[in-house]
Image: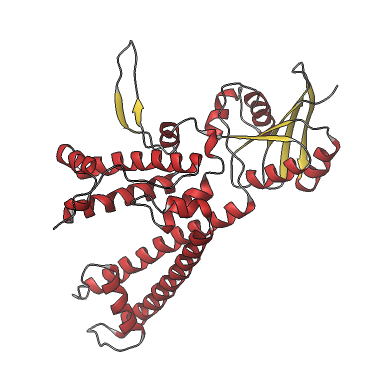
């Protein structure tokens, strides 16, 4: 009997395979070590392979696609309803094999190695920015215990850190605490330099990537957001509309409707947390600019701010930006403003 569909449960070392034929009968149910995966699928005729989206799924999808197979990746949350009683690798592989054949299942587009390399810049930058913030807060807290207050702002904190690291300032702090402060200041300055290096790499990537350049024309989206969106969305055609794309990012209201009554709640926050954060930050920058220079702002944004609080307006603007992002990526266009700001005389 010829295998038509395979459910592959990914792991670090031991992979589980569940294969069925055209009638749904089980043909293969076995565990494979990592070195056995590619030789096993090399011997199979082209078939449909399902797997859950995870950290290594795009790599295996590329390798299995090279062998002539059709690979489809699914969000783990969508596979879970097909898991039967119990929980083990064999049951998970069977559930994957069943879920991948469902006509209403939603699949993820396979990312290229270049897209994953671009995303590695963003993941590393996100980690380093968090570490920099933690170190600055630690320095602020230690100095506050000795009655020394650092003015607000990252630049002021880094300026004092440079003075402490270079021993250009004298603080009324015990020698042991001063030694710890010197170590923390050196670490935060090193982290800041690494963040700047990644920012330069992201800027260079934005200049060479055609999709990122077009996304950068959208107000509120800079090099970081443009390159992150270009690398994360492998195939914009998998979304039928901009609303679907905004829903994928978790920027649409959650529903709890029944009996013909529609009840909308907060946004779902079900999608990519990093992309959603970048869009909300970009929308917040637009709101801040609109308050300082209302004559150059979009009239629709000003009308929204007149009705809603700033945080609600920022999420609504992020939703709108997500729809514009999808339209530009799907149609190959650049952003065109639909309003004519009233310039100051």
**Where does the image place residue 11, in percent across and percent down from the top left?**
67, 43
**Where does the image place residue 56, in percent across and percent down from the top left?**
63, 47
Q: Is residue 208 above or below residue 286?
A: below
Q: Quadrant of residue 61?
A: top right
Q: Is residue 38 above or below residue 28?
A: below
Query: Camera-side residue: 270 or 275?
Result: 275
Q: Quadrant of residue 134?
A: bottom left
Horizontal side of 125 relative to 309 (left or right) equals right
- Count of numbered circles on the image: 0
Query: Residue placed at 33% from the left, 88% from the top?
Result: 167
Query: Residue placed at 45% from the left, 36% from the top?
Result: 245
Horizontal side of 299 relative to 262 (left or right) equals left
Query: Camera-side residue: 272 or 234?
Result: 234
Query: Camera-side residue: 332 or 56?
Result: 332
**Where does the image place residue 258, in percent across and percent down from the top left?**
34, 14
Q: Residue furthest front?
A: 345
Q: Quadrant of the C terminus?
A: bottom left
Q: Residue furthest top?
A: 259
Q: Is residue 142 above or below residue 133?
A: below
Q: Quadrant of the N terminus?
A: top right
Q: Is residue 141 above or below residue 219?
A: below
**Where does the image place residue 53, in percent across and percent down from the top left?**
59, 39
Horizontal side of 300 relative to 39 (left or right) equals left
Q: Quadrant of residue 71?
A: top right
């Amino acid at each position: 009997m010829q295998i038509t569909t395979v459910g592959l449960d990914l792991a670090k070392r031991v992979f589980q395979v569940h294969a069925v034929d055209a009638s749904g009968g089980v043909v293969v149910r076995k565990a494979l070590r990592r070195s056995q995966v590619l030789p096993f699928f090399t011997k199979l005729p082209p078939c449909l392979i399902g797997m859950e989206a995870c950290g290594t799924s795009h790599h295996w999808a590329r390798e299995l696609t090279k062998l002539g197979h059709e690979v489809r990746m699914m969000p783990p949350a969508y596979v879970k309803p097909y898991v039967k009683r119990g929980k083990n690798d064999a049951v998970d592989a069977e559930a994957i094999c069943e879920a991948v054949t469902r006509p209403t299942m939603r699949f993820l587009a396979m990312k290229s190695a270049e897209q994953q390399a671009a995303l590695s810049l963003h993941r590393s930058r996100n980690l380093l920015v968090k570490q920099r913030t933690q170190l600055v807060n630690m320095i602020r807290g230690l100095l506050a215990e000795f009655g020394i207050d650092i003015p607000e702002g990252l630049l002021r904190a880094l300026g004092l850190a440079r003075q402490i690291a270079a021993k250009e300032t004298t603080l009324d702090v015990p020698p042991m605490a001063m030694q710890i402060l010197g170590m923390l200041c050196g670490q935060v300055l090193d982290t800041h330099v690494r963040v700047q290096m990644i920012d330069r790499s992201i800027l260079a990537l934005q200049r060479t990537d055609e999709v990122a350049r077009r996304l950068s024309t959208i107000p509120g989206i800079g090099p970081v957001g443009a390159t992150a969106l270009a690398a994360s969305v492998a195939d914009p055609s998998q979304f039928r509309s901009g609303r679907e794309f905004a829903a994928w990012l978790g920027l649409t209201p959650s529903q709890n409707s029944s009996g013909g009554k529609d009840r909308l709640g907060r946004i779902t926050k079900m999608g990519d947390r990093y992309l959603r954060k970048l869009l909300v930050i970009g929308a917040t920058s637009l709101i801040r600019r609109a308050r300082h220079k209302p004559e150059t702002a979009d009239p629709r944004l000003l009308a929204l701010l007149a009705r809603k609080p700033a945080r609600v307006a920022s999420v609504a603007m992020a939703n709108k930006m997500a729809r514009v992002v999808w339209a530009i990526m799907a149609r190959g266009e650049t952003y065109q403003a639909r309003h004519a700001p009233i310039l100051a005389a």
